[in-house]
Amino acid sequence: MRSAPRIAILNGRLIDPANGIDEITGLYIAEGKVLAIGERPPGFEADQILDAGGKILCPGLIDLNAHLREPGHEHKATIASETTAAARSGITTVCCAPDTDPVIDSPAVIELIRRRAKQSGKAMVLPIGALTQGLGGEIISEMAALKEAGCVAVSNVHRPLKNTLVERRALEYAATYDVLVFLRPEDLHLRDNGCVHEGPIATRLGLPGIPSAAECVAVARDLALAAHTGARIHFRGISTATSLRMIRRAQGDGLPVSADVPAHQLHLTEQDVDQFNSQCHVTPPLRTLQDREALREGVATGIISAICSDHQPHEPDAKLLPFPSTAPGISALETLLPLTLKLVEDGVLSLSTAIARVTAGPAAILGIEAGRLGIGDRADICIFDPDHAWTFTEEGMLSAGRNTPFLGWHFNGLVTHTLFEGRIVYQNP
Amino acid sequence: MKNNLQLDEQGRLRHFLTIEGLSRPLLTEILDTAESFAGVGERTVKKVPLLRGKVIANLFFETSTRTRTTFELAAKRLSADVLNLNISTSSTTKGETLLDTLRNLEAMQVDMFVVRHNESGSAHFIAQHAAPHVSVINAGDGRHAHPTQAMLDMFTIRRHKKDFSQLKVAIVGDLLHSRVARSQIAALNTLGVAEIRCIAPRTLMPGDIRSCGVHPYSNMEQGIRDADVVIMLRLQKERMQGAFIPSEHEYFRLFGLTGRRLELLHPEAIVMHPGPINRGVEMDSQVADGERSVILQQVTYGIAVRMAVMSLCMQSSDRGGEA
């Protein structure tokens, strides 16, 4: 393998929230790592110089949850297609959900994912293992082996455990090996066959609703079990103001619990489902405006320390059905950064906080050495032009899944370069 | 564009998917048109040639006798050719998708789909994907809407009560699962009734039903007092996946329409039910068959109302074709 090029990125505004840096400076890369910041190191001969004048440099984004669909669902997407889409959005680390076929519950599947990711070479793919074998919710997975094989967390994805005793054992076992557990809080009985938020829109459209209580009941249960077992839990994709309050209280009590929110929950509400828009069919469902405002505040204050894509690419047919039968989810890698930056425009976050929520925040949750650009750190870098206005179109998408409600949205801030391990993996133009 | 999926550029009915978004003049036009068709069934030759040469497909993904039959009769009285397709939902999920079924029928030059499906939004979905010349009529989608049923109910009410603006209407029963109730509420509000009351235990009533412009009641006696129209909903046992009510017996005791409760209504009140009735659950037989009951008239009027909706939709699609 040829050695990584020596790259100098000059005149850019470096925003590295983990190191408290926000200044216009030069950044020098050698052997895939950050060699120096500021002055050109003596004897540094760049193979390539990038002029980042007027642009922002930040650590490559870390996405806590994306469904890459490989192995098993290659008709929806592949690791190659989706890491390419990730690079376009400045994402250099992707946690992939275990609901593949076969499920990520054995080192063999992890090895396969690792190989595919390496072939693509566009982003670091960190597998999330299954919390229970086959995601069946009954037998706990071989978490110790999964961790050794490289899983950064375990999760039962969108299939929360029905049996609280199994959940207790799973959390105890995870705590034994210090394995991080991602929980999507939802009480399956209360969820029933719901497909949208239980509220006026559901009532009007006659769509079966999912009450806010379906999430809050599960948050309460999960918090109690986390306190009891000492497991380190992370709430994946919370959607209601009430669960946010419960998590804030638990954090105040010193429980090591974190939470993320998918970017779309910070911009859309139940109203967007009107006219049976199946692109807005997501799990958890889009909630009320009050919930959205509370989630935005939670992201600002840091109770929610990460914004993720919750990327779920689908083939077109998956959305070409009557609303309740459509597959939930949004192809979201390519809107993670734009929607996060839109929060800055909307006055919700400072630019530095916005960047922190997609870099240092998720890195801290995972406990990985990424999401920062100190000297010696891996040179995973996103460079974007904050003033570049553009329109999100289907033709412009790189993901294999074109299912998104954001087509036609106007954004400010376009990624011009993405560097992964010190190599340019995406460049525009 | 999507907001007016049901209407063409001239604001005429193109599809009939839901009452929501339709104006009072348009609903009145449907009722007036139905009035002109009401006599057709009493003639020796029960046919008018309005839709001669048109092909109408009754696409029923959910079983139905009454609705399908009245749609079929309505289409035949308009001289259309009718295809009846009963497609079980399970077979479509295994093989052909809904869209494929639609495309195949379009290839057979069908002009209008009358659709019943167990999922909310299915009629919208079909209308969104149908060829431009095809009209879609919603014959019931999930819990969402059953607009022709609501219009035949309005027709029945208008035959008995001249002025909507003075009416107090009570709707009793399983509002949570009822597409009929949703469409009735929308129609009654658009036609400007004085008051709509919804009566049910909380397990069968959406928590935010007030947002639909109605007054919720959990006490039958209070809810039906002085009502001019009482609409009893079918207790849709087949839809119930959980314990919504403890027993039919308790339901009847608390919400059943009995002779004694009839006395609480306005003296000239009428009693309606979209059918089929569960006698002894929603109402007594003596009420169902009594002088206040207009339940069988509803069925008769259903044909005229469906003729009206079909002919109005077809007018719009014909004009679109000429333009």
Image: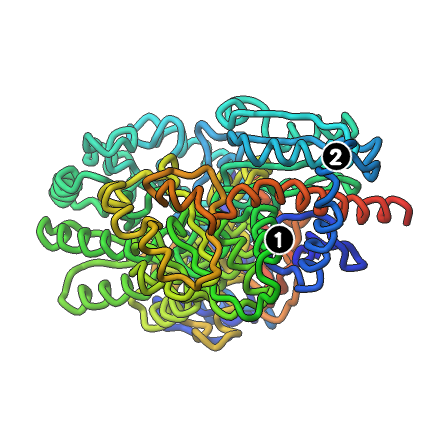
- The spot of residue A144 in percent (x, y) is 19, 35
How crowded pointer 1 is (Cα within 10 Å; few <14, some 14-19, many 20+) is rated as many
Q: Residues within 10 Å of mark 2 (few under 14, many from 20)?
A: many
Front residue (pair A49, A226)? A226
Where residue A90 is drawn, which disc sits there? Answer: none
Quadrant in the rendering for residue B41: top right
Where, by quadrant of the figure, is residue B127 drawn? top right
Examine the rendered structure and indicate whether residue B163 appears above or below residue B184: below
Q: Looking at the image, do the residues carrying marks 1 and 2 touch, with CB atoms under 8 Å apart?
A: no
**Mark 2 secondary-structure assignment:** helix
- Report the amino acid beneath label 1: Phe
Question: Sequence order check: which comes first, mark 1 or mark 2?
Answer: 2
The residue positioned 75% from the left and 34% from the top of the image is B46
Residue hosting label 1: B155
- The answer to whether marks 1 and 2 sit on the same chain is yes
Q: Residue at x 36, y 51 (%)?
A: A210
Give the secondary structure at mark 1: helix
B208, A241: nearer the viewer: B208
Front residue of A227 and B151: B151
Q: Chain of mark 1?
A: B
At horizontal 39% and vertical 48% (from top left) the residue drawn is A65
Residue furthest out toward the right: B322
Please tell me in which quadrant of the rendered image residue A295 appears: bottom left
**Disc 2 chain ID:** B
Picture coordinates of residue B133 (x, y %)? 79, 41
Instruction: Point out residue B261 in the picture as x, y percentages from the top left corner.
Output: 33, 56
- The answer to whether any part of residue A243 appears in the image is yes
Question: Which residue is located at x 15 percent, y 52 percent?
Answer: A226
One can see residue A94 in this view: no
> Residue A216: percent from the left, percent from the top?
26, 57
Name the amino acid type tagged 2.
Arg
In the picture of the structure, the residue carrying the numbered disc 2 is: B77
